């Protein structure tokens, strides 16, 4: 797995490089110190995962992520920060980040990178607890029928919003993993969404608080 690290504290970036490369499956191909470095290094190396801080001097990680995602909708960006700021979490979800974890959780960084590489979205426990409230927005009941979303597809959406993997969803709903993947792909098409993260955001914005 090829990783780019971007953090405005060079000591932190080097420490992260040392920690990550203790795992033989991980290679840190480059490090940067600002969001603009993140944009440049992503374009140059196209890493499997971009591990990036949020608060940086000239261009923030959030601004960098937005720019990168304009260029590559498949970009896998994992935010690693000391801040569980509500506004940051919402923005990270909106720009399509694959994860948001706190630097204090050093032991969870490597597993999070592997999960993101595998297509999962990863949010630290403290972050996950905040998401439903942060993404709330009252209103009328969402009309699934208008989008031709079946009851089974609704169940899949809810499972994805809860952060469950395809395997876990398959076990919960008595389906094969392949069938779950097909359902998710179909739902994304119907709702004109890019990925699982956007689907989770959609659920908490449009559905959960309106039931």
Image: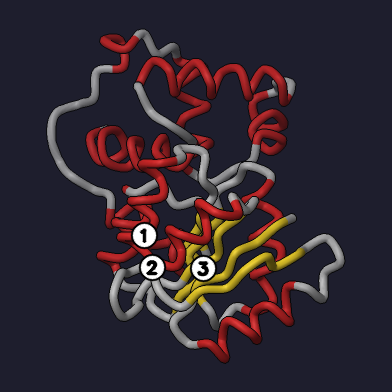
**Residue topped by disc 1:** 64
Q: Residue at x 73, y 82 (%)?
A: 18
| Mark before the other along the chain sequence, 3 or 1 | 1
**Residue topped by disc 2:** 35
Tell me: residue 91, above or below residue 187.
Answer: below
Report helix, strand or loop for mark 2.
helix
Quadrant of the rendered structure where residue 3 is? Answer: bottom right
Quadrant of the rendered structure where residue 191 is? Answer: top left
Q: Are marks 2 and 1 in contact (CB under 8 Å)?
A: yes
- Mark seen at residue 153: none
Residue 119, x across and y down, in percent: 62, 42
Screen quadrant of the C terminus: top left
| Mark before the other along the chain sequence, 2 or 1 | 2
Residue 77, x across and y down, in percent: 51, 55
**Residue topped by disc 3:** 101
Give the left or right position of residue 97, taking residue 56 as reference. right
Quadrant of the rendered structure where residue 88 is? Answer: bottom left
Residue 110, x across and y down, in percent: 70, 67
Report helix, strand or loop for mark 3.
strand
Give neighbour class at mark 2: few <14, some 14-19, many 20+ (Cα, 10 Å). Answer: many
Most foreground residue, 87 or 128: 87
Q: Residue at x 31, y 72 (%)?
A: 85
Nearest-to-viewer mark from 3 and 1: 1
């Amino acid at each position: 797995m090829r990783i780019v690290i971007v953090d405005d504290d060079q000591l932190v970036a080097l420490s992260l490089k040392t920690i990550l490369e203790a795992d033989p499956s991980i290679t840190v191909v480059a490090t940067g110190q600002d969001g603009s470095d993140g944009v440049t290094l992503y374009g140059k190396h196209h890493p499997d995962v971009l591990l990036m801080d949020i608060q940086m001097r000239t261009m923030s990680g959030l601004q960098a992520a937005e720019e990168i995602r304009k260029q590559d909708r498949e970009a896998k960006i994992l935010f690693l920060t000391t801040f569980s700021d509500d506004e940051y979490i919402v923005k990270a979800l909106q720009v399509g980040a694959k994860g948001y974890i706190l630097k204090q959780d050093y032991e969870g960084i490597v597993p999070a990178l592997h999960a993101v590489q595998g297509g999962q979205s990863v949010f630290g426990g403290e972050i996950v607890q905040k998401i439903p409230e942060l993404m709330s927005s009252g209103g009328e009941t969402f009309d699934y029928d208008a989008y031709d979303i079946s009851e089974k597809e609704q169940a899949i959406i809810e499972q994805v919003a809860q952060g469950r993997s395809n395997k876990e969803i398959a076990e919960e709903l008595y389906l094969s993993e392949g069938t779950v993947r097909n359902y998710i792909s179909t739902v994304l098409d119907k709702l004109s969404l890019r990925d699982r993260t956007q689907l989770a955001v959609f659920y908490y914005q449009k559905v959960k608080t309106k039931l």
